[in-house]
Amino acid sequence: MSGCSCPLTAFRFSLVPHAVFPGPAQVPMMSPNGSVPPIYVPPGYVSQIIEENGVRRVLVLPQQPDFHPGGHSPLHHPPPPPHAHMPAFIPHPAMMPPPPHLYTSMAGGVGDLSSQYISQYHPAHIFSEQVSADSHPQHGRPTFVHRDDRTTKTHERLQKKLKERQGGGGGGGGGQVKDSPPSSPQKSCNSPPAVDIHNGIGGKELEAEPRHPVTCPDKQISKGKNGESRVLDKEAQALIAFLSTISKPVVSDIQARGAEVSWVAPARPENENGSVEDDSSSPQPLSYDISVSVEGKDGKYQTMYCGEELSATLKGLRPATDHHVRVQAMSNSIVGSPSEPVSFTTLSCEPDPPNPPKKASGTKNALVLQWKASCDNGSKILNYILQWDEGKGTGIFEKCYSGPQKQYRVTKLTPASRYSFRLAAENDMGVSEFSEVVDLFTSCSVPLPPFPPELETAGVTWLCVKWQRPSSSPKEDDISYILEMEEEGSGYGFQRSYDGEELSHTVRNLHRSTKYKFRVAAYNSEGKSNPSQVVEFITKPDRPSSPCRPVIKGRVLPNSFKMAWEPPKEDGGSEVTKYVVELSEGLSGSSWGLVYSGPALEHVCDGLKPGCSYQTRVYCMSEGGQSPMSETLQVQTLAVPPGPCQPPRLVGKPKSREVQLRWVPPQVDGGSPVSCYSVEVSGQQAEESREVYQGPELDCSVGALMPGKTYSFRVKAANKAGFGPLSERCEMTTAPGAPEQCKAPSTTCKSPTCVVVSWEAPPCNGAPVTEFRLEWGAAEGTMQVCYSGSALSHEMRGLLPATNYFCRVQAANLAGVGPFSEAVLCQTPCSVPAAVSNIYQLKESELQKYETTADEDEEDEEGVVSRPSPVFSPSTCLGIGWDSPCDHGSEITSYLIDLGEKQPVVVGRVNKHVIQHLQPDTSYRIRIQAQNSLGTGPFSHTFKLKTKPLPPQPPRLECTAFSHQTLRLKWGDGPTKAASSEALQYQLQMGDKNGRFLPLYKGPCHTHKVQRLNESTSYTFRIQAFNEAGEGPFSNVYTFTTPRSPPAPVKAPKVERLDDNSCEVTWEALPPMKGDPVIYTLQSMIGNSEFKQIYKGSATSFHAQNLQTSSDYRFRVCAIRQCQDATELSGPYSPTVTLSPQRSDAAATGGSSAGSGLRTSAESARTRQSLTDEQCAFLLLMVFAVIAILIAFIIQYFVIK
C-alpha cells in the first residue's frame, strides 16, 4: 500500500466523473495494491512522483520549456496560484476520456465498492491572495489571454452545470457523487470556505462537500484534532465496517406531509467458521441519522432525525413530491457509510393558501383585482374563490367570484369607499385556507382647486411651502398635488417643482433675496383640478463675508491699543449695519468679550492689563445675518513693575532666634511674571533696614535674631521691568529663649542615707526660670529625674551608705529647657550593716557535715582544746543559714541570732550556724542582725522554724525459721506487710567479716528472709526504726547460727545378678562434707512389703545373698553425714531399682548371662532416661534449623525474585 499527496496549483482535475477538485490543494489518496493511481492533468501541466518516509507524493506542476525535475525541489518551492485574470482552459469531464480500470463495478451502489475504488475528497481551498496584474508569473511562463469559441462554449456549459448543481444543493461538487462512499467520520475541515474558480474566474462560494473515507485492507487515514493525518487502527476500521452494514430503511404510512420510517440495527459480520464476531469492541448504544433528499437520489440530503430509536416520524415533507431517504449509523465520533437510499412519493392534498389579491386598476364604481396561482400540491387547481365584505366593514364575507380565472372586475361600487377582499384556491383534494384580508378603495370625482400655498419657513436658498387638502374631497380619496414655481425675471413661466401626496414641500437651490411665484393643483384618478391662486415669496438675503483682519494703529501702551479693519468684500445682498469687536485675554481664546458694536471701522481698546496677551477679532451684521469671524489679531501690552505685596505673615510660632515668614504674590504682576522677592528687616529702634532674603520662593527663614525682641519685616516683588514698591510693615516679636546652662550643683551629706543638693539660678535668657530639674543616679549614664520644682535645693533620702552617686541640674522656662550642668560626684559615709534579707534552714545532709567548737569553759592546764561535736539531731538542733547583707562601707564582724525567750546567740563572720539544745517538735521565731565597727544593724524579718520530733526506738529482733542456707527474721508486733500509708519504716543491717554492718532491708515490713547463707555459720544483725522525725538508734547486735546441711541425694544404685540367689548392688560415692565422713544405708523390699535396712556403712557396694528366685526385689540407698558432735544427718533416698526374677527360657544361658542381661537392661533404661533431655534439646535445635532454612528459601524465591 502506498499513500499519495498532490499539492495542486490553481486548476481543476478530475479523478472520476462529476468530481472536480479546485487547486491549489493536497489531495490524499490511498491505493490498496501499492501502486500510484493514474492521474490526468490538463494540458500545460506535468505530474512528478516523490517518495518521502514511505509516502509517495504526486506533484502536479506547470510545464515549462526549461523545467528540469531535479532543478528545484517542489516540496520546498511550490508554484504560486495563477492570477485571477488569467483564463485557463479546463476541459469538461465529459470531454475527457475515462481513466482505464478505475472501476470494476458500480452497480452495487454505495455498499458494493470494488477494490479499485478511489475516493472523492472535499475540494481544497484556493489561495485568497491575488497577484497584481503587472507582476510576472514564476518560471517565466507567459500570460495566456487567448480564448477561442470552443473554449468559451465549454466554459459556459460548465458554469451552467455548476449552477444547476448549486441550485439542487450540490453546488460545485457539493452533492455526493453517485455510487461514491459515504463521508468519513474522522475528517473535519477547519479552513475557511473555498471559492470556486472556473477557468480563472471567481464564482460563488461553494458549500462544504461531505468527504468520504478511503477504504484499504489494513489501515485508514483520518484527520486528528489539529488537522494532521493519522492512521486508524484495526479496531476503528472494524467499527466503521460494522456501522456500514446497516440496511436500507422501510417507509410506511405515507401522508401528504409526513411518513413513518423504520430500520434495523447493523448486523455483525460472520467469521470464517460461520460464527458471529464478538461485539465487545462496539460501543453502546448506537445513534442513527435519517436524511432526506428531494433533489433525486444523488441530490443534497438534509437531516430529519438523529437519535437512538429504530423508527422515526418524518414531518414537514412536500406533498406530491419524490423523496429519497437513507439511514446512517454512528457510534461516538465514528460514522459508518449511509445505507442505500429508498424513494417514496408523498400524497397530494389541497392547495397552499394563495397570496392576497392586488388592485390592477379602478374607477369610482369598479375595481379590477388580480392574483397569482399558489402551489397545487399535486392536484391541479380548478377554481379560485374570491370573497368580499360588500363595503360594510362588519367582517362578514360573501362570495363574489368562483372560477379558474386569475382576475376579476367588481362593479357597481360606491365612489371613495373601502372594500375588503380575501382569496382561496380549490382542487380535487379540497379547498385551501383563505389568504390575508386586503382593503382596497374606489376612486372619487375630480378635486376642487386647493387654497393658495402658504410660506412655512424661508431660507437663503430655499423656501418651505405648505398647502391644504381640498375640503370637498373625502378622506378615502387618494389625492396627489402638483406644486409649480416661477422665478421673477426668468422668462420661463411656471415650472413643476413637486408632484406627490404630501401637503408641504421645500424648494431648494434658489437665489438669495429673490422673489418667486407659487401655485398648487390637486389631482386623483378622475382628473386634475384647476391651479390655486398665485402667491409670491422672497428668499432671505445671505450673510456677509468676514471683514478683513484687523491691524494695530499707533503704539501699543501698557493699558490700551488702537485697532482698525476693512469692510467685507461680499455683503450678502444687504448693507452692513454694524461691526462687532470681541476681545479675549490670553492666547487660548476660550473666553471672548464684546468691547465694541457700531458702524465705525476702528476702535481703541483700553482698560487692559499691562504685559498681558490679548486676541481680538471682528465680525459684521446685516439683514442676512452675522458674518464669519475675521482672522484673529494678537496684541501684547507693555509690562510694568509689579504692585505692592501684602505684608509678610508669620508661619507657626516665632522661635527665640529665628522666625519663619511667608507671603503671597502681588495682585498686580505688571504684565510679567514675578521672578524675585526681597525681604528687609529692621529693629524696633531707629535701625537701618537690611535685606535678609532675595529669591523666587514665597517663604524664608530669618535667623540670627535676639530672643524676645520686636522686629519689622517688609517684602517687595520684581519682574523683568524691575522691583515694585515695598509692602507695609509687619511687626513680630521673637520668642524667649531657653535658660543658659546651670553651674555645677553642691552636695552636703547630712547622714549616711541623706544628702542635700543645692544650685544657683542661671541667666533666664528673656523669660523667668519656672522650673529646675535634678537628675540623680549611681552612674552617669543611668541618672533619672528625682526632683522638678522651683526651689534651689533638694534633700535626697533613702540612699545607701558608702555609695558613689552622680547628680546634675538644668533650668527651664516657657521657652524651653536649658542644657544640663556638669555631673557632680557625691559619696555617702559608712554606716551600720543592712538587715539580713534571707534566712533558710539547712538540710540534714549539710547539718551532719557542720562542726562547732566546744565551750570555752572546758579548758585544762595545757590550753584550749577544740573537739568535734557529736552528730546533730534534727529533733534538738536547728541548722540555719543566711545571706550576707550589705556592710555599708564597714566590714561585718559578727551576727546576733535572736530566738525569742532564749538568750541571743552571737556568732562570728559565718553564714551558717547550728542551734543546739532545743526542744523536739517545737517552733521557734528566729531573726538575725549584723554588727560592724559602727554598730549593730537592724533585725531581719522574723522566720519561723520548727524542730522535728524524736525518732522511734528500735524493735526486738527474732528468728522465726531457719535452714542451713536461710534465716527468717521478725521484728515488731505489726503485720508481716505494713500498709502503704504507714510512716514508720525499718532498716535491717547484717555484719560482715570485717565488723561492718551492711544494709540488708529497708521498708515498712516486719519480716525478712535472709538467703544464700553458709551452713553452721553465725551471723550478726541489728535493726533501726525511722520516720519523718528521723532515724532512731540501732538496736543491740543479734547473732543467729545456721544448722548443718544434710548430704546430697545418691543416684539410683546398680544391681547385677550373680546367680539365682545372689546379686551385687553398687552406688556412687559422695565426697566428705567439711571434714565430716559420709556413710550409706541400703534398704530392700520384697514384692509389696516395706523397705528394710540390709546394710549400713561406708562401702559403696553390697553382696546380697539368699534371694528368692520367684520374687521382685527393690533397692534404694541414702547418704548419712556423721558430724563431729556424734550426730548424724540423713539425706534423701535414691530412686528405686528393681531386680526381676530370672525367666525359665533363659536358664540355659547361665546365671551370669541372666545377671548381665538384667544389669544391661537396667543400665540401658537409665541411659535412655538420662539421654531423654539431650535428645529433646537436639530435636528442638534441628526443628528450628529446618524452619529457618524454609523461611530463608521463601524470602529468596518469592520476595527478592
Image: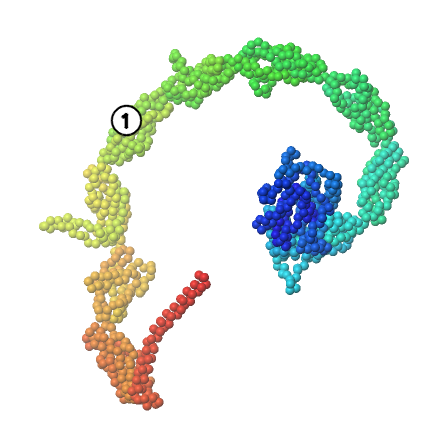
Q: Amino acid at mark 1?
A: Ala
Residue at the spot of label 1: 744
Q: Is residue 1021 left or right of residue 449?
A: left
Q: Is residue 894 visible?
A: yes
Quarter of the view holding residue 217: bottom right
- Return the residue nearer the eye: 841 or 1055: 1055
- Return the residue nearer the eye: 898 or 226: 226
Q: Give x and y (percent) for residue 511.
A: 74, 18
The colour scheme used here is rainbow
Q: Quadrant of the N terminus?
A: bottom right
Q: Quadrant of the C terminus?
A: bottom left
Q: Give x and y (percent) for residue 1058.
A: 28, 86
Q: Give x and y (percent) for residue 1148.
A: 32, 90
Q: Secondary structure at mark 1?
A: loop
Q: Give x and y (percent) for residue 343.
A: 76, 53
The residue positioned farthest toward the left in the image shown: 861
1060 over 748 or under it: above or below: below
